[in-house]
């Protein structure tokens, strides 16, 4: 076991990161020799995206490890020099979903040609939505527009400012209860980025502790139901008008805790394929190199 190593771990209060919080609260990180401090932002202070777009987490927030969308981890490490990628995976069976209004003429993904789709730019939705829509549309027919956090995207759809938005549970189920229609589902992919202090021993200790939390949640999902629903409760506090006409007890009843997975140590060859895809679409500059993006552990 490692001697106690202090690690500042950025926490995303989203459904797919539940095991990270469980591992911290159950003491699994500590038992693996990691003195983990969860770094969290007050949801009331987040207006656009939870991970600050203009500040580095390893610098401005003094973070040692942070989870983030796989494609944004590539761009952020290259363009902002905000650490190096150490792990990645799908993390949970929680797909992104494109939803539309019930009065919309959009009946299939092909109907989204040149139709603005609300996402949170420079998050997983921007990249995963683009990749998913490329199975149905030409790249130049895809129109992704920034609409902010989940409640902001729902509000934009509710008010008719966009005809479709991307969501992930528990907000997809909330959209069901608001009367919106599901159109398309696709996988959510995440990465973990570390600063220069993260070596292989620390990463392996982190993954072991995370894996223990995954086993706990998958074995007894109902025991973690309230923790899983915390973000929905926080959003109800910051966007109460959106919840006025919704039976929240019914929403909660419809939600189930998903099965989680343990991220894998980063595979440079696999990420290099994603980097090539990003370069081809002008999402990152042509000079980006995988060796400068992935950690050498």
Image (cartoon, helix red, strand yellow):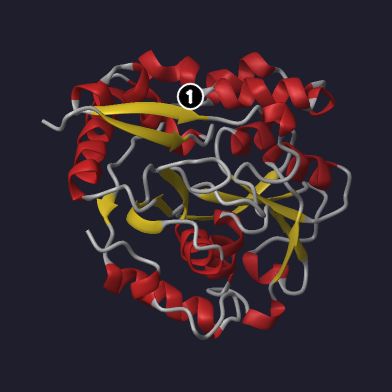
Residue in the image at 20% along x and 50% along y: 200
Q: Can residue 246 be seen at all in this image of the molecule?
A: no
Left/right placement of residue 170 relative to residue 44 reads left
Quarter of the figure with residue 149: top right
**Percent from the top left, x then y, of residue 142?**
68, 73
Q: For this rendering, which residue is in front, 15 or 75?
A: 75
149 to 25, vertically: above or below: below
| Closer-to-camera residue (152/179) | 152
Residue furthest toward the left? Answer: 1
At horizontal 33% and vertical 37% (from top left) the residue drawn is 260
Q: Is 114 rendered above or below residue 25? A: below
Mark yes or no: residue 54 visible. yes
* Quadrant (top left/top right/bottom left/bottom right) for the N terminus: top left
Which quarter shows the C terminus?
bottom left
273 or 228, which is in the foreground?
A: 273
Q: Quadrant of residue 125?
A: bottom right
291 vs 105, left or right, is left
Q: Secondary structure at mark 1?
A: helix
Q: Residue at x 72, y 22 (%)?
A: 236
Q: Determine whether, in the image, residue 154 is placed left or right of residue 18.
A: right
**Which residue is disc 1 drawn over?**
228
Q: Is 144 drawn above or below residue 264 in the view shown?
A: below
The foreground one among 240 and 37 is: 37
Q: Position of residue 186 (x, y in %)?
A: 49, 56
Count of marks overlaid on the render: 1
Q: Residue at x 47, y 19 (%)?
A: 227
Q: Position of residue 254 (x, y in %)?
A: 54, 24
- Give neighbour class at mark 1: few <14, some 14-19, many 20+ (Cα, 10 Å): many
Residue 24 position in % (x across, y down): 35, 23
């Amino acid at each position: 076991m490692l001697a106690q190593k202090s690690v500042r771990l950025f926490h995303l209060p989203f459904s797919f990161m539940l095991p990270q919080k469980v591992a911290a609260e159950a003491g699994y990180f500590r038992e693996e020799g990691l003195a983990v401090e969860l770094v969290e932002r007050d949801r009331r202070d987040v207006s656009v995206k939870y991970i600050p777009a203009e500040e580095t987490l390893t610098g401005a927030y003094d973070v040692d490890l942070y989870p983030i969308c796989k494609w944004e981890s590539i761009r952020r490490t290259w363009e902002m020099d905000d650490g190096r990628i150490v792990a990645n995976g799908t993390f949970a069976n929680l797909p992104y979903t494109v939803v539309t209004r019930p009065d919309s003429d959009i009946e299939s993904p092909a109907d989204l040609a040149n139709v603005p789709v609300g996402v949170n730019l420079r998050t997983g939705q921007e990249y995963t939505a683009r990749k998913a829509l490329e199975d149905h549309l030409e790249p130049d027919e895809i129109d992704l527009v920034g609409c902010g956090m989940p409640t902001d995207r729902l509000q934009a759809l509710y008010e008719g400012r966009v005809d479709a938005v991307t969501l992930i549970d528990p907000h997809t189920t909330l959209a069901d209860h608001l009367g919106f229609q599901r159109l398309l589902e696709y996988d959510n992919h995440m990465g973990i980025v570390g600063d220069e202090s993260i070596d292989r021993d620390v990463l392996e200790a982190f993954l072991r502790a995370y894996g223990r939390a995954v086993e706990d949640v998958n074995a007894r999902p109902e025991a973690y139901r309230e923790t899983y629903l915390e973000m929905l409760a926080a959003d109800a506090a910051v966007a109460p008008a959106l919840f006025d006409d919704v039976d929240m007890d019914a929403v909660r009843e419809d939600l189930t805790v998903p099965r989680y997975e343990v991220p894998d140590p980063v595979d440079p060859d696999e990420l290099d394929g994603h980097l090539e895809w990003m370069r081809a679409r002008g999402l990152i500059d042509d000079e980006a190199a995988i060796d400068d993006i992935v950690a050498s552990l």
